[in-house]
Image: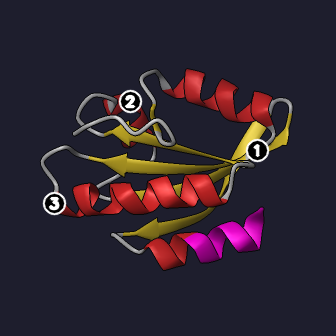
Amino acid sequence: MKEDPAVKTFKGTFEELKALVQQSHKLFVVDFFANWAIPSKRLLPHLSEIAKEHPDVEVIRIDIDKNEDISDHYQIVSVPHIKLLKSVTNNDFMEVAFVNGCQPDAIRSKIAQFN
């Protein structure tokens, strides 16, 4: 799948993801995806649009096959699975919402609710 400049693919550990979210103080839309999953491929253009509509929100993707520690931490069993993460203090962050499946309107609704 071709990399979209508006939607970065995160390659790192859970601790690195945690540090990224904590330091930015932005809302993160995290797409757990798999290259072999058709719904993940269908969602990507929508994520690109969402990233452009909301420059104050970080939209990233995490490949569940290459980042098993993160997908195991969040118990991801189907893709696409979207988590919205937000820093609550300099030392912690929380999941504020999630969306299962290819539902761009639901993602937009959650962004409006928590951003």
Residue at image location 34% in from the left, 61% down from the top: 43
Q: Earlier in the sequence, mark 3 or mark 2?
A: 3
- Crowd band around label 2 with a 10 angstrom C-alpha radius: few (<14), some (14–19), many (20+): some
* Three-letter residue code for mark 2: Asp
* Three-letter residue code for mark 1: Lys
Disc number for residue 38 = 3
Q: Is residue 12 magenta?
A: no
* Picture quadrant of residue 79: bottom left
Q: Looking at this view, is 69 or 61 the one in front?
A: 61
66 versus 53 height, above or below: above
Q: Is residue 113 magenta?
A: yes
Name the secondary structure under disc 1: loop
Give the x, y percent position of residue 82.
Answer: 46, 58
Instruction: Give the position of the C terminus as an image quadrant.
Output: bottom right
- Residue extending farthest to the right is 89
* Three-letter residue code for mark 3: Ile
Q: Looking at this view, is 23 or 58 the one in front?
A: 58
Disc number for residue 9 = none
Q: Does the image show residue 78?
A: no
Give the x, y percent position of residue 25.
Answer: 81, 39
35 versus 103 height, above or below: above
Q: Which marked residue is nearer to the observer: mark 3 or mark 2?
A: 3
Residue position for label 2: 69
Q: Does the image show residue 109?
A: yes
Instruction: Give the position of the N terminus as an image quadrant.
Output: top left
- Crowd band around label 1 with a 10 angstrom C-alpha radius: few (<14), some (14–19), many (20+): some
Distance CA(mark 3)–CA(mark 2): 23 Å
Image: magenta residue range: 108-115
